[in-house]
Image: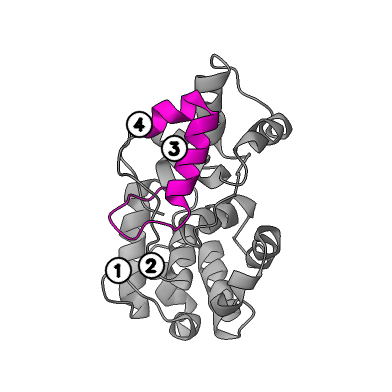
Amino acid sequence: MASAVARARGLGARVKPTYWDAATVALGRGDPVLRRLMAAAPGAHLARRGDPFTTLARAIVGQQISVKAAQSIWDRFVAATGGGGQPVTLDPARVGRVRMPTLRRAGLSERKANYLRDLARHFAGGALDPRAWPALDDETLIARLTGVKGIGRWTAEMFLIFHELRPDVFPVDDIGLQKAVALHYREGERMAPSELRAFGARWSPYRSVATWYLWRSLDPIPVEY
């Protein structure tokens, strides 16, 4: 599993989440470690990038390959599927009509090409409808997303944090989060996911924010999801 330190963070060049300031005050008041980490990144915050379909498609393309290779394949995939604009926007219906040989020539494996076509079908057919998501709790939305081939829980959690800007997601299976908590709270000793989940309860209802600052403590240069 790729670490979110390498794959999934956003920098505050765009609109700040409405809960961000309240979250940093609450977390800093109760946790001196987080207070120090937040002070080291003044003005930084999470920010959304792109539309839901394009964001999830990019996540699938980037699975289990280097950032450089993912960018190269992504650029060819966008060209092959008629995407455009800045940030790039893809049309699910159009992606769903692209033939398999075209997707393979873009550098996609057959498995990832099928994942992307399944994602396109979910969006074009309405099984995934972003307009309905605000009414869904985190676990329900994660269940909807993981119904798509190629989207596991980790990818869904990253999407909830970085695109949906959900404030209280806590991805206990993420390697970067495990490493950061071990570094700052346990003298380098990592916790099992179940122990980490219990440990992180102290940061609710702002566990996404705590996680984001812990990731930044490992690598201060953000990479957008």
Residue placed under numbered mark 1 in the picture: 87
Dot 3 or dot 4, earlier in sequence: 4
Q: Nearer the viewer, residue 134 or 221?
A: 134
Alpha-carbon distance for marks 4 and 1? Answer: 30 Å
Q: Earlier in the sequence, mark 2 or mark 3?
A: 2
In the image, taking residue 158 as reference, residue 85 lies left or right, namely left
The location of residue 180, given as percent across then percent down, is 50, 28
Q: Is residue 46 left or right of residue 207?
A: left
Quarter of the image for residue 121 reads bottom right
For label 3, the residue is 213
Mark 3 vs mark 4, foreground winner is 4
Q: Which residues are magenta?
A: 9-38
Q: Secondary structure at mark 3?
A: helix
Q: Tag 2's secondary structure?
A: loop
According to the picture, the residue beneath numbered tag 4 turns out to be: 39
CB-based contact (under 8 Å), mark 1 and mark 2: yes
Could you tell me how far apart the alpha carbons at marks 2 and 4 are, in whole angstroms? 28 Å
